Amino acid sequence: MFGNKKEDKKPAAETAKAPGTTTAAKAAPAAAPAAAAAAAATDNAAQRPQVTLRYIDQPELAETFADSIGGLSFDGQSLRIEFTVTRMDEAKPNAPMTGRRYPACRLVLPPGAAVDLINRMQQVAAALTQAGVLRQNVPQPTAGAPQTRN
């Protein structure tokens, strides 16, 4: 998205779906074995033609600043993320600091794009960890979990 502009080449199954078609996961019965569903998905993907998509930049597209995530939800069909911006109220002597949080952008992604976002954010987190900007959390033992001794 930022800086790395290249052509995306993805199979049609990942990038576009013709109106009126269903994915193999929806077409397969719920009780079908996983192997049958995987075979149906492979057959369905083999029948679709390859689609080549070119990225075309739009420099006039406005950027949105946000300093926090206001809400995040997934309803089974779309991931919804609300980005917010904080505005501090005027400081008053001997009074606590107050502020307001306003929505700046609401992003709605279908499941495939949500998975792509998760994968890319994991790559960013790994790069930040490697650069020393982010530290990996070490899980702490819970109260009920047995502790091992050396």
Image (cartoon, rainbow, N blue to C red):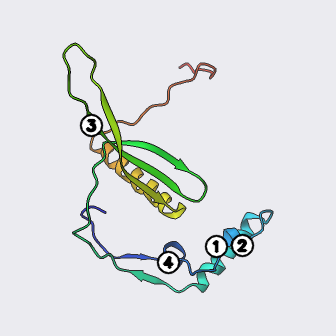
Q: Are marks 2 and 4 in contact (CB under 8 Å)?
A: no
Q: Is the residue marked by circle 4 packed among few (<14), some (14-19), or many (20+) residues within 10 Å?
A: some
As helix, strand or loop, the secondary structure at mark 3 comes to strand
**35 or 45, which is in the foreground?**
45
* Pair 3/4: label in front: 3
Q: Which mark is drawn over residue 23?
A: 1
Residue drawn 50% across the image and 78% down it: 11
Q: Is the residue marked by circle 3 packed among few (<14), some (14-19), or many (20+) residues within 10 Å?
A: few
Give the residue at mark 4.
11
User: Which residue lies most toward the top here?
Assistant: 94
* Pair 3/2: label in front: 3
Q: Are marks 1 and 2 in contact (CB under 8 Å)?
A: yes
**Type of amino acid at the residue the image marks with label 3:** Arg
Image coordinates of residue 35 in percent, x first then y, are: 72, 67
**Type of amino acid at the residue the image marks with label 1:** Thr
Give the residue at mark 3.
87
* Pair 1/3: label in front: 3
Of mark 1 and mark 3, the one earlier in the sequence is: 1
Of mark 2 and mark 4, the one earlier in the sequence is: 4
Residue drawn 55% across the image and 77% down it: 17
Q: Label 3 vs label 4: CA separation?
A: 44 Å
**Type of amino acid at the residue the image marks with label 4:** Pro
As helix, strand or loop, the secondary structure at mark 4 comes to loop
Image coordinates of residue 70 in percent, x first then y, are: 42, 42
Q: Label 1 vs label 3: CA separation?
A: 45 Å
**Type of amino acid at the residue the image marks with label 2:** Ala
- Tell me: 128 left or right of 37: left
As helix, strand or loop, the secondary structure at mark 2 comes to helix
Query: Which quadrant holds residue 55?
Result: bottom left
Q: Label 2 vs label 4: CA separation?
A: 19 Å
Q: Is residue 139 above or below residue 146?
A: below
Give the residue at mark 2.
27
